[in-house]
Image: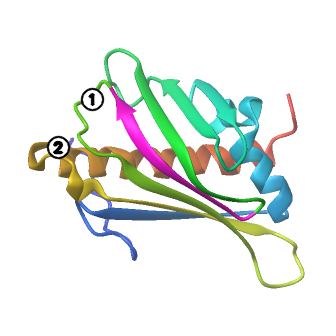
């Protein structure tokens, strides 16, 4: 049976930008730790992670998922660094024929109310700068990947530390 297609969400422009959000029951400073600490990143985002924090920092990721063959590798170079609320990276998949990096924005917002929770807002755009033969395929792959990763993040945050 074919997989049911997921509806395009507000903030998504196929082949151009995608936006995913995840509410988390943590204050912004704790959510930030899930973005910049290697052991935490490997629990939800990639099998391997290496973060060099700071304004001149970077993010290196590697893993396999979604039935892909082989290992994928990604690199993000920090463009804006404002902890614990904003990290903007020039983000690209290595060895995949990308001719330009996308822009990945990770923003942590305090949720209104007394609960003290936060929202992680992921915005990735610039897919249209990739070759036409790649942009929609790459956009769709990241849309599935971010949705899955944010679900794993919510489960990891809810689970006791290992």
Give the magenta range: 85-94
Position in image of residue 49 (x %, y %): 62, 28
Quadrant of the rendering where the N terminus is positioned: top left
Q: Which mark is residue 36?
A: none
Instruction: Give the residue drawn at x 27%, y 29%.
Output: 96
Q: Work out which residue is located at the far bottom of the displayed protein and give it.
A: 113
| x 78%, y 84%: residue | 112
Q: Which of the two residues, 39 or 149, is positioned nearer the viewer here?
A: 39
Q: Which residue is mark 1?
A: 96
Residue at position x 62%, y 43% in the image:
152
Residue 39 pos. (x, y %): 75, 29
**Please, is residue 113 above or below residue 144 in the view?**
below
Q: Is residue 88 above or below residue 110?
A: above
Circles 1 and 2 in contact, beta carbons < 8 Å:
yes
N-terminal label among 1 and 2: 1
Question: Would residue 26 be seen by someone viewing this image from the given angle?
Answer: no
Residue 152 sits inside the magenta stretch: no
In the shown orientation, is residue 95 left or right of residue 151? left
- Please tell me whether residue 150 is drawn above or below residue 73 in the rendered image: below
Residue 2 image point, x, y percent: 20, 44
Magenta-colored stretch includes residue 93: yes
Q: Nearer the viewer, residue 116 or 97?
A: 97
- Is residue 102 in view from this perspective? yes
Residue occupying the point 72% across, 65% down: 85
In the image, is 138 to the left or to the right of 160? left
**Main secondary structure type of the part rendered in magenta:** strand
Q: Is residue 69 above or below residue 99?
A: above
State the mark number for residue 134: 2
Helix, strand or loop at disc 2?
helix
Q: Nearer the viewer, residue 113 or 96?
A: 96
């Amino acid at each position: 049976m074919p997989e049911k297609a997921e509806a395009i969400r507000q903030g998504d422009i196929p082949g151009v930008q995608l936006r995913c959000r995840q509410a988390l029951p943590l204050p912004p400073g704790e959510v930030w730790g899930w973005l910049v600490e290697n052991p935490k990143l490997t629990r939800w985002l990639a099998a391997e992670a290496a973060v060099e924090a700071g304004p001149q920092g970077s993010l290196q990721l590697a893993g396999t998922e979604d039935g892909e063959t082989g290992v994928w590798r990604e690199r993000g170079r920090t463009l804006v660094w404002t902890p614990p609320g904003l990290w903007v990276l020039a983000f690209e998949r290595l060895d995949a024929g990308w001719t330009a990096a996308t822009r990945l924005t990770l923003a942590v917002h305090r949720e209104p109310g007394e609960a003290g929770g936060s929202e992680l807002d992921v915005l990735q755009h610039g897919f249209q700068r990739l070759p036409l033969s790649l942009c929609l395929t790459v956009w769709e792959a990241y849309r599935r990947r971010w949705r899955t990763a944010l679900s794993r993040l919510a489960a990891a945050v809810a689970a006791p530390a290992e």
